[in-house]
Image (tube, rainbow, N blue to C red):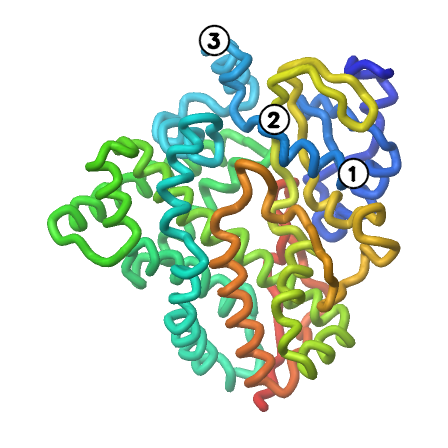
């Protein structure tokens, strides 16, 4: 059996996630990695990239594979790695972003996840439908007669942040600023960690923190029926400390913004690229649930996450030592013909079963997936009902560059009311 020592041939594979070509269509590069079979080491990332569905799913669902290196590295080693990745000298980012429920494991993760999970129940999400429908109706009312819109900016970017903001307890007028902060923080998670991005991410985190401090002070003085009030009560009961409260609120707001905006944009683009599927959905609106799952599979909005092994392990037939860092390419796994058949590269609104990995797996399975899917269900159902036709008003939308995101920068559409 092969060992995990990188060989020269393993670093020669063309994989350029910051390129324009990759942004427009990463799937040939993903297919090439899958065809190589075993994970491939890339020095620039300091990790082994995993592309096949079974391997990615196995790691994502394995509790011995963790997000934090604290289980096998000393504090000094962790700080050295942060410096090597330009992930250091960011006091507020380190305090509230680098530490979070997403990037913790074990008891801390379980404790924080429990506090959020008890709030994001299916019954609670279902109760938000009326509020979401009312918000979407008013938004579409303001857009429907314009003839041409940017779907990403004018519609997709307006819904998720406002909805999760209302759930948490953020006033509508503050949601646009929260989106800016969230995007500036999240950009630094990608591999392009320049000093400029670093300064922007720290500034955004600091301003975000001060905003949440003010909001929490207001809620302590005048509790309301919102999530932040209930999380404050959990803090008072000793279930989380103040830094964990701030970090959790930031994570909820950031997760409620970017990825849902991206999958709304790529999902609409997919319907336009496959007009037979758009027509199929028009004729059978009951397919909306499988259609939304297919949008997440076809263009996974968060196509990359990492894990560390806490034990010696075997992945793709290769042996790896404890402490190995794996890059899980969800975007590659979700187009794997071995898992989704020969039509894995096609968009099928009725695909069932559809056991994609867009929401991750195991202990880090996305808690917000039900709310994101409800947002999408209301938006697409309402648009298809109220519009006679939807068409692209540009030749080819440009997609965001990077390894950690997948979505169009803009999506110019021509609308014809029903």
Residue depicted at x 24% and y 37%: 235
Q: Residue furthest bottom?
A: 418
Pointers 2 and 3 in contact (CB under 8 A)? Answer: no
Q: Which residue is mark 2?
A: 65
Quarter of the view holding residue 315: top right
Q: Which residue is mark 1?
A: 52
* Earlier residue among tags 2 and 1: 1
Residue 189 image point, x, y percent: 54, 36
Quarter of the view holding residue 85: top right
Q: Secondary structure at mark 3?
A: helix
Q: Is residue 208 above or below residue 171?
A: above
Q: Secondary structure at mark 2?
A: strand
Q: 148 or 326: nearer the eye?
A: 326
Report how far apart the C-alphas of labels 2 and 3 lie in the structure.
21 Å
In this rendering, which labeled residue sits more in front, label 3 or label 1? 1
Report how far apart the C-alphas of labels 2 and 1 lie in the structure.
17 Å
Residue depicted at x 65% and y 84%: 389
Q: Which residue is mark 3?
A: 76
Q: Residue furthest left?
A: 221
Instruction: Say which quadrant the C terminus sits in.
Output: bottom right
Q: Secondary structure at mark 1?
A: loop
**Left or right, residue 286 beside residue 72:** right
Residue depicted at x 76% and y 38%: 54
Q: 356 or 268: nearer the eye?
A: 356
**Left or right, residue 198 beside residue 217:** right
């Amino acid at each position: 059996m092969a060992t995990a020592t990188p060989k020269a041939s393993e670093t020669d594979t063309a994989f350029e996630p910051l390129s324009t070509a990759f942004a427009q269509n990463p799937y040939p590069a993903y297919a090439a990695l899958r065809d190589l079979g075993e994970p491939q080491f890339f020095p620039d990332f300091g990790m082994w990239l995993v592309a096949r569905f079974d391997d990615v799913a196995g790691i994502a669902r394995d509790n011995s594979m963790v997000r934090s290196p604290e289980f096998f590295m000393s504090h000094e080693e962790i700080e050295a790695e942060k410096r090597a990745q330009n992930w250091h000298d960011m006091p507020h980012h380190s305090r509230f972003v680098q530490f979070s429920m997403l990037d913790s494991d074990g008891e801390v993760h379980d404790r924080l996840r429990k506090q959020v999970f008890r709030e994001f129940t299916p019954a609670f999400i279902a109760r938000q439908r009326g509020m979401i429908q009312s918000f979407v109706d008013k938004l579409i009312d303001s857009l429907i007669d314009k003839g041409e819109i940017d779907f990403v900016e004018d519609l997709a970017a307006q819904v998720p942040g406002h909805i999760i903001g209302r759930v948490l307890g953020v006033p509508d007028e503050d949601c646009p600023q929260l989106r800016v902060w969230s995007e500036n923080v999240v950009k630094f998670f990608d591999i392009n960690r320049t000093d400029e991005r670093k300064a922007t991410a720290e500034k955004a985190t600091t301003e975000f923190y001060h905003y949440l401090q003010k909001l929490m002070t207001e809620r302590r003085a005048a509790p309301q029926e919102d999530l932040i009030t209930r999380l404050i009560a959990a803090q008072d009961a000793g279930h989380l400390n103040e830094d964990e409260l701030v970090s959790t609120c930031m994570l909820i707001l950031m997760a409620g913004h970017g990825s849902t905006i991206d999958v709304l944009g790529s999902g609409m683009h997919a319907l336009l690229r496959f007009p037979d599927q758009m027509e199929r959905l028009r004729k059978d609106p009951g397919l909306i649930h499988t259609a939304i799952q297919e949008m997440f599979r076809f263009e996974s909005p968060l196509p990359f996450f990492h894990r560390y092994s806490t034990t010696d392990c075997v992945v793709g037939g290769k042996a790896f030592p404890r402490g190995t860092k794996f890059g899980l390419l969800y975007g590659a796994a979700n187009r794997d013909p071995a898992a989704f058949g020969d039509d894995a590269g096609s968009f099928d609104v009725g695909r069932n079963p559809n056991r994609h990995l867009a929401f991750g797996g195991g202990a880090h399975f996305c808690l917000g997936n039900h709310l994101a899917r409800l947002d999408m269900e209301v938006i697409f159902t309402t648009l298809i009902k109220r519009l006679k036709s939807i068409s692209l008003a540009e030749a080819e939308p440009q997609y965001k560059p990077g390894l950690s995101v997948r979505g169009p920068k803009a999506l110019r559409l021509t609308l014809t009311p029903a």
